[in-house]
Amino acid sequence: MTTTARALGALKASLDRMPDPAGRAEAAALEAELAAVHGVRHAIAVSSGTAALHTALVACNIGPGDEVLLPAATVIMTVSAVTAAGAHPVFVDASRDGRGMDLADVAAKTTERTRAIVPVHLAGRTDGLLDLAAYAQSAGLHLVEDACQAQGSTTGGRVAGTVGAIGCFSLKDGKIISCGEGGYLLTDDDTFAERAAAYRMHWLTPAPGAPAASRRGMNYRLAEPLAALARHHLKGLDQAVTRRREQAHRLYDLVGEIPGLNVHAPAPGDVPNGYSALWRVDLDRPRDFSTRLAEAGVANSVGTYRLRAAHQHPACQDLSPADCPRAAQAVDRMLAVTLQQQTTEADLHRIAETIRREAETWTEVR
């Protein structure tokens, strides 16, 4: 039986059990399995990774008047979650080596209104996470991890999304484990878990200090058929992470050494999940180069999905963002090549050949 057939079987079994009087048997089972797999007390399933981030911030009682520190090198979805909670995002520059948030800038931008730090593990990388967690603890700030691209990544032997107070994940198609659309958050804190569970169901259930129906919430529930698909794919998490890592390393080998392209090796103690193969582009006009690769069929974060530093994003200009030049340069020079579970050896050869050809002829292009 093929993987697709097994997934369809899991979906059919879920549909056969509907309507479920409780309305969320599959989601509840998924939560128990996610908690067990990640070694945490609680998992809360929601409708998307953005919903997970928004819910996590609400669970930390973050709202209007509060500030949240997050990297300028992030996707717009992270920013949207902060503003949806009513808080003000404060963008932090990248470190001098381009690995994560600059701790000196984090400290400089921490004010009496700062309530949380949200590191974002782009391309499955957890650069500087443990140092950031130590700072957050010393400053009395919540650390909420945006681990939407980091299922299975580890740092110092700890799983991404379990280092901070809450870890947030996506189940959107293309992620290591997916069900088309969805998300979840992880936490060991009972209060955060109960607040999150209440918020994602219009506060129809109680949480500490907030009886049922005492607050407004959202409908962020994960649909039962999607939960069934997520449960099916979760069984293969270890194999999926292993496959992505093998794909990334194979692509590095096939591309080899090319002037102007430098593999972004993980920091000591970090083991990324292989979500994307990652290079630093030191060619002229790096954003144009990534765009050219996208046009040639090599999907990547900058060229295909138009990733740019958040403080430069048109939708963030009303936030009066400070300039973060190192973050802007890091994003512009980032070549994060998208990989998928179904990417074949032939696909990897095609991608590598295209990258090599375009890089070797780029200086001739005007």
Image (cartoon, rainbow, N blue to C red):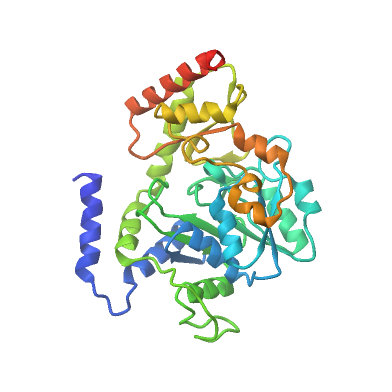
Q: Number of callouts in the render? A: 0
Residue 260 screen position, x and y as percent:
59, 20
Res 94 visible: yes
Residue 88 screen position, x and y as percent:
67, 62
Front position in the image: 298 or 199: 298
In the displayed structure, 56 sits above or below 323; it is below
Q: Residue at x 51, y 14 (%)?
A: 361
- In the figure, is residue 159 to the left or right of 20? right
Q: Residue at x 59, y 40 (%)?
A: 270
Residue 128 screen position, x and y as percent:
67, 44
Q: Quadrant of residue 346?
A: top left
Q: Quadrant of residue 69?
A: bottom right
Residue 356 screen position, x and y as percent:
47, 18
In the displayed structure, 61 sits above or below 307; it is below
- In the figure, is residue 314 to the left or right of 36? right
In the displayed structure, 214 sits above or below 77; it is below
